[in-house]
Amino acid sequence: MMLTPAHTTSRLAPWHWRDGFWGLLIGAACSLSLFVLQPLLLQAWHAVVSLWSQPLGLALTPLPQDAPPPSQTLMLSTSTVVALLYVLAGYWHERYRPLRVVVRALCLVQGSACLFFAWVPARFPYAVHQHLSGLLQMGADFLMTVPLMLALGWGVLHLPWRLKLLGPLLVVAYFMVWLPHQVLLHAWVLHHGSVLFMPVLLLCLGPLLNGWIFVALYAWLASLTPRTVNRTGAL
């Protein structure tokens, strides 16, 4: 008689309709609460921006005022760095291909901004305070959808109650702290730099970055999903 080693496999715990119902209910309740509290949340974020304005050397009232247009020296130096970085990324090893794609995308966005300001600098339609107030509002709207998105993709799974409640609360708490500091980062760059960097900040380091962070946090939560272990063996 020959014995073969037992094989261990894992799968998600059995799902019941109550898991999905309560998960969706919790997500909807959290999103509704954030919608109702959104004005208070925006006031708190404005207070955070004002609190950090002096240590960071930002001349802010509630939000930054208009920044000066980019100088010719800044445009030339930025264009040179963007062009060199785009070419240099092509020589990176194939293992760095994802990073190369991201870097080249950033270069294309910033290069487009340099071309725009070189041709029609007076037609740029947005002021700094419009950019930052819009970023705060987009952050608040995004935060309102976070619990519902988690409920649709993660809360419907078979999870312990403490995990089903604590997971979304931790993600929401993270974004509540991160989003006003993201606005501060934009304010610092635009105050000490120029509106030349506003497009890359908005398109690459704004809502898109928040989406990437959400995906990373969702993957972390998914790794915590309980699994059942099956052991099989043969003689």
Image (spheres, rainbow, N blue to C red):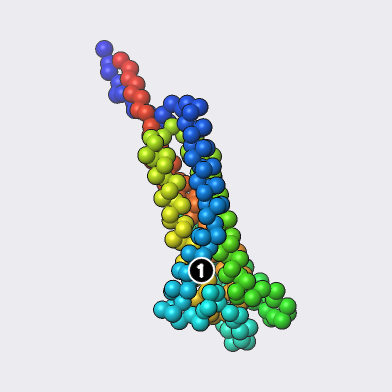
Residue 153 position, x and y percent, is: 52, 40
Residue at image location 38% in from the left, 32% down from the top = 227
Residue at image location 56% in from the left, 49% down from the top = 145
Residue 56 occupies which quadrant of the picture? bottom left
Residue 52 occupies which quadrant of the picture? bottom left
Q: Residues within 10 Å of mark 1 (few under 14, many from 20)?
A: some
Q: Is residue 94 visible?
A: no
Residue 1 occupies which quadrant of the picture? top left
Residue 109 or 2: which is nearer the viewer?
109
Residue 23 or 47: which is nearer the viewer?
47
User: What kind of residue is marked 1?
Assistant: His
Residue 19 or 8: which is nearer the viewer?
19
Relative to residue 120, is residue 225 drawn left or right? Answer: left
Residue 58 position, x and y percent, is: 49, 80
Q: Quadrant of the C terminus?
A: top left
Instruction: Single out the residue that lies furthest toward the top.
Output: 1
Indicate whether 188 appears above or below 212.
Answer: below
Residue at image location 43% in from the left, 48% down from the top = 169
Indicate whether 16 appears above or below 210.
Answer: above
Q: Is residue 16 visible?
A: yes
Residue 131 position, x and y percent, is: 61, 70
Residue 149 position, x and y percent, is: 54, 45
Relative to residue 166, is residue 83 drawn left or right? Answer: right
Q: How many marks?
A: 1
Which residue matches tag 1? 46
Residue at image location 41% in from the left, 34% down from the top = 159
Element type at mark 1: helix
Residue 231 or 31: which is nearer the viewer?
31
